[in-house]
Image (cartoon, rainbow, N blue to C red):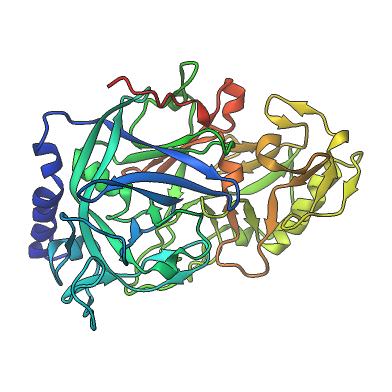
């Protein structure tokens, strides 16, 4: 990058983001947002306050999303809204070199001439269309890792305006998506720049639709009632960069914003299942590998992996009667013949073997099985078809009541496996404020 470009980015960070610190002597070490599980869509939702005057903005959480996008048609009213002029510092930071005109209407949020644009994507269904890079006030609650603290604000938080058709298939009341991915303008990157804390964030999704999970921006502690600091019991594995974008559409050739990890093999009841291991690596075209996703409700496996996975798992439950599969699942069982443990149904243990045989992400009954009827449990993994873009997508159900910490500076994932073994859950963060 040329020196002038670097200077431009520095000036942007200094003058557009840092004022949030200058307005107050309080510098938070971390931030927290509540995360709810929507029962009808199985999407994970959060909420920030944005605009002047501040209004709550309900968002679908997208772990691999490139940035925050919000629908700006009709009801977006804010005296502090600003658009990013073509070739300005915000456009450079967003890697948005192309400019668009907005015809046939008065200038308004989401429609200005001479603005740089990106491609907000609804990653639930792949809908993607251009929208202007924008800025507005946003407020969020700080935390000491045990309780929420003071509310802090970023006066010019970057986001992208989208059209209302982007909301198709999103949960009721949602007006955008909160992108946490590997980009310079995702929420973790913007918040860490604004408040000068470590480039880390963590997600802890609740399995309940009636109790909140949390997303933390910044380092731990991450304390769940009754006083369990989950950050002290993490196992670590490298985050792998997919050099090819996984976005539906893109203006520029960039690496994927999704979070990939290296899975070497899969064990069921301690036995490695046979598979084409080349599928576990990312090829030159960006196909293959394993990523983590909050927009996929269940883990998705490439067809040949899925077939041997189902076979091995059902073999481990040979004495349990199978019942007719309930879509989208391929293996369902009579749950009256299955016992229970502290970590859910007493079913075969699933182990994702990572960079070595000593680094294992274990999945127990609470995260492997889905109760679809009073007497029916289904294996919560689905068939992803032949030649999918990504061979294994670890979905939301397998993430629930597990804390995952993403260290962007060192490209490292910390994971807890099931918090049920620690006698706590992701719904046990104390959202009662001490501030």
Above or below, comparing residue 3 to residue 367 in the picture = below
At 33% from the left edge and 32% from the top edge, which residue is drawn?
219
Q: Quadrant of the C terminus?
A: top left
- 37 vs 8, left or right, is right
- 180 vs 302, left or right, is left
At 72% from the left edge and 62% from the top edge, which residue is drawn?
304
Across and down, in percent, residue 109 comes to 23, 65
Across and down, in percent, residue 143 comes to 31, 28
- 290 vs 384, left or right, is left
**Residue that lies at the very extreme toward the top in this rendered image:** 226
Across and down, in percent, residue 369 comes to 72, 42
Across and down, in percent, residue 370 comes to 71, 43
Number of marks drawn: 0
**Residue that lies at the very extreme toward the bottom in this rendered image:** 104
Above or below, comparing residue 231 to residue 49 in the picture = above
Residue 147, image quadrant: top left
284 or 336, which lies in front? 336
75 or 277, which lies in front? 75
Q: Quadrant of the N terminus?
A: bottom left
Residue 247 in view (yes/no): no
Above or below, comparing residue 283 to residue 208 in the picture = below
At 23% from the left edge and 83% from the top edge, which residue is drawn?
103
- 223 vs 68, left or right, is right
Residue 361 in view (yes/no): yes
């Amino acid at each position: 990058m040329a020196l002038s470009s670097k200077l431009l980015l520095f000036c942007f960070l200094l003058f557009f983001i840092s004022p949030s610190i200058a307005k107050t002597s309080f510098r938070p070490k971390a931030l927290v947002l509540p995360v709810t599980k929507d029962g009808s869509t199985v999407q994970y939702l959060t909420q920030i306050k944005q605009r002047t005057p501040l209004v709550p903005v309900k968002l679908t959480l997208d772990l691999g999303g490139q940035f925050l996008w919000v629908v700006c048609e009709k009801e977006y009213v804010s005296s502090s809204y600003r658009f990013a002029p073509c070739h300005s510092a915000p456009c450079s930071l967003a890697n948005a070199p192309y400019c668009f005109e907005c015809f046939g209407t008065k200038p308004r949020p989401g429609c200005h001439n001479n603005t740089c644009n990106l491609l907000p994507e609804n990653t639930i269904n792949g809908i993607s269309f251009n929208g202007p890079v924008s800025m507005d006030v946003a407020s969020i609650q700080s935390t000491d890792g045990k309780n929420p603290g003071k509310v802090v604000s970023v006066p010019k938080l970057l986001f992208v305006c989208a059209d209302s058709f982007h909301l198709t298939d999103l949960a009721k009341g949602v007006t955008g998506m909160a992108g946490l991915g590997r980009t310079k303008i995702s929420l973790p990157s913007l918040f860490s720049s604004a408040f000068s804390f470590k480039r880390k964030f963590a997600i802890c999704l609740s399995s309940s639709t009636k109790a909140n999970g949390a997303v933390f921006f910044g380092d731990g502690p991450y304390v769940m009632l009754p006083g369990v600091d989950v950050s002290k019991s993490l196992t670590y594995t490298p985050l792998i960069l997919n050099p090819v974008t996984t976005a539906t559409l893109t203006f520029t050739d960039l690496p994927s914003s999704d979070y990939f990890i290296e899975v070497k093999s899969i064990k069921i009841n301690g036995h490695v299942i046979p598979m084409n291991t080349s599928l576990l690596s990312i090829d030159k075209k960006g196909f293959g590998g394993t990523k983590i996703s909050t927009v996929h409700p269940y883990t998705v496996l490439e067809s040949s992996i899925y077939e041997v996975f189902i076979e091995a798992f059902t073999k481990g439950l040979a004495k349990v009667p199978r019942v007719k599969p309930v879509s989208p699942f391929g293996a369902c069982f009579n749950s009256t013949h299955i016992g229970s443990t502290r970590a859910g149904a007493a079913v075969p243990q699933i182990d994702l073997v990572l960079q070595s045989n000593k680094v294992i992400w274990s999945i127990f009954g609470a995260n492997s099985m889905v109760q679809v009827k009073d007497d029916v449990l289904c294996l919560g993994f689905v068939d992803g078809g032949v030649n999918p873009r990504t061979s294994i997508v670890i979905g939301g159900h397998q993430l629930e009541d597990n804390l995952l910490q993403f260290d962007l500076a060192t490209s490292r994932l910390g994971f807890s496996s099931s918090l049920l073994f620690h006698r706590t859950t992701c719904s046990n963060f104390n959202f009662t404020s001490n501030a």
